[in-house]
Each structure stands twice: as C-alpha cells, then as structure tokens.
Image: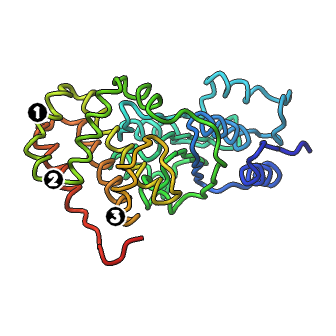
Amino acid sequence: MEEIIIKNQPILSKVLNKINNTKYSSQAYILYGNSKEKLKEYALLFSKILVCPHNYQKNCEKCNICMRIDNNNFEELKIIEPINYMIKKDEILKLRNLFSTQSIEGRNQVYIITDVETLNISAANSILKFLEEPDSNSVAIFTTTNLDGVIKTILSRCQTIKINNLKNKYGIEFIKELTFFDEDTIYKIIDFTKLIEKDITKAIADIKHEFIDLFDDKQKLISAINVMLLYYKDMLNYKISQKCVYFESNDVKTLANKQKTNIISKKISFILENISKLEYNVNVLLFMENLIIGIGEIKDDKSNRS
C-alpha cells in the first residue's frame, strides 16, 4: 500500500495514513496554519482520502472521484468559503439539505468550510447542530489561520491538526490585496484603531469624520473593520511569538504589552461576532459606537499580565 507522505507535515501525514488504512475517521477536523492556499490544498487531499471507496493512491485508476474533486465536480463534496469575510446561515442550511441522505458514490460525504472563524452566530449555531445531529455519514473539514477566532464549541468537537508554517504573503502588500485599499487608507484605519486603545472617548467623538465618512458603503466598512481585526491579531501574534506578521510597528508591541493574551483574544472574538451584524440594515454610526464601546469594556487585569 502506498504511504501518504506530505513534505514537512508529519502530523497530517500520520492522520491521513491512519484513515486510509483503517477507514475510520472522526466526524470533524480542523486544519490550522499560516497559509490559506496550503490549508485548502491539504483539505482537498483530506477529502479524497475520506471519500475514496478504495485505498487512496496518487494517480489511482480505480475510480474517477479524485479527478472530479480536482475539477470541483463531485456532488458529495461541498466547499463553503466566506463572502465578504462572512459565512451565513443560508449556506449551512443548503449544506444540510444537500447532505440529508447517505452517500452514494463515496465512503463519506465531506464538507470543507474555509476560514471557519468567519461563521456568523446563526451559521455557527447551525453547524453545531449539524455536528451534533448529522443527517448522513458526513465528515467536516474546517480550515483557519486564526485558531483563537474559532468558536470554542465548534473547536471542542474537532480533531485539530496543526500545519507547519509555510511561506505566505503577509505584511502591508497582503492587506492591500485583501481589502483593495491603498497604503494611506490602511494606515488611517490603524491610526483609528490605536486611538480606540489609547483614548476611547475621543475615538467615539471622531467616529464619523475619521471612519464612517471614509468608508461610506457596507463593503468598505467591512474591509476597514477587517484591517482593525488584523491589527489586533498582530498584537496576539506578538504576545504569543514575539513577532508581528502584518504590521512591523513598535505601536503593535507597545499596545500588546499593555494587555493580557486572553484580553486580546476576547477583543478579536468580539470584533468577529459583530462583523456579522453588518449583513443586516443596521445604523452604521450606532454600530460603530457599540463596537468601540464593547472593545473598551473588555478590561485587562493589570495586576496579572502575561
């Protein structure tokens, strides 16, 4: 039997070989690492091994399932990706409807949810129900570059697999590609984020002029808040590994050192939870006021920093 060997990924290789040899799998897995492209590539390989009715082998000629997966033409594999940095409940309901019966061709039905931390609250509740009460022999593969942003109740139901660090686009060029903002606009968002941390009263007073007037439609506003989110993620990166990923800035380090790791994580989770509200027709000014106040209310215990 051909052994599955993925270069520099011994943990993933071990898990995939075990599934391939025993035909036994958990109900849900989460792959986490620093490269979205590689996470998706590994998730697709994972799906082939879970689905294949034979022992998976590269270039296997016993069936054409793998080829159809590569061509995104296999009905028993569903891939869900965020739209505008968000995965909505409707996508999960469609998934449940699609996977309401047992698989016909493959050994399992598989669904991949990329950037699982972007599930909004209602979508997360729906996926939890699906994990607890599956309608078929379905297996979930979730991917994320931000494990701390994944809802804990989902995380607790998954076997987590760490993908060793890989080269990926980061820094300001990555953010420009992600948001379509120019560098000056990105740093205006960062200046406002720093203001929230340093003087929340002034940040609330300056919301309209310094933020809302600059991002005058929903998509721009979502992108701007995602830049804020990356700034907080960099604070967390620095706390954990003493290294910034997106912004090479002393300000990131200074703000990170003033807060405990779990406080920064809570702020990240709070921002993620609130982004989902923008799918509704909310009052933008009130939304931003509540967002800033909510961030400010996540307090640090200054006597016990870590």
Q: Which residue is mark 3?
A: 259
Q: Is residue 128 visible?
A: no
Among the two numbered marks 3 and 1 on one chain, the one whose residue lies closer to the N terminus: 1
Q: Position of residue 264 (x, y in %)?
A: 36, 59
Find out whether the residues at labels 1 and 2 contact each other: C-beta distance under 8 Å. no
In the image, taking residue 21 as reference, residue 74 lies left or right, namely: left
Q: Which residue is mark 2?
A: 200
Q: Which mark is residue 78?
A: none
Disc 2 is placed on an element classified as: helix
Q: Position of residue 293 (x, y in %)?
A: 16, 54
Inspect the image, locate mark 3, and give the three-letter code of the amino acid beneath it: Gln
Inspect the image, locate mark 2, and give the three-letter code of the amino acid beneath it: Ile
In the image, taking residue 278 as reference, residue 166 lies left or right, namely: right
Q: Which mark is residue 209?
A: 1
Q: Residues within 10 Å of mark 3 (few under 14, many from 20)?
A: many
Look at 41% across and 56% down and name the residue there: 151
Look at 44% across and 61% down and name the residue there: 153
Look at 41% across and 49% down and name the residue there: 233
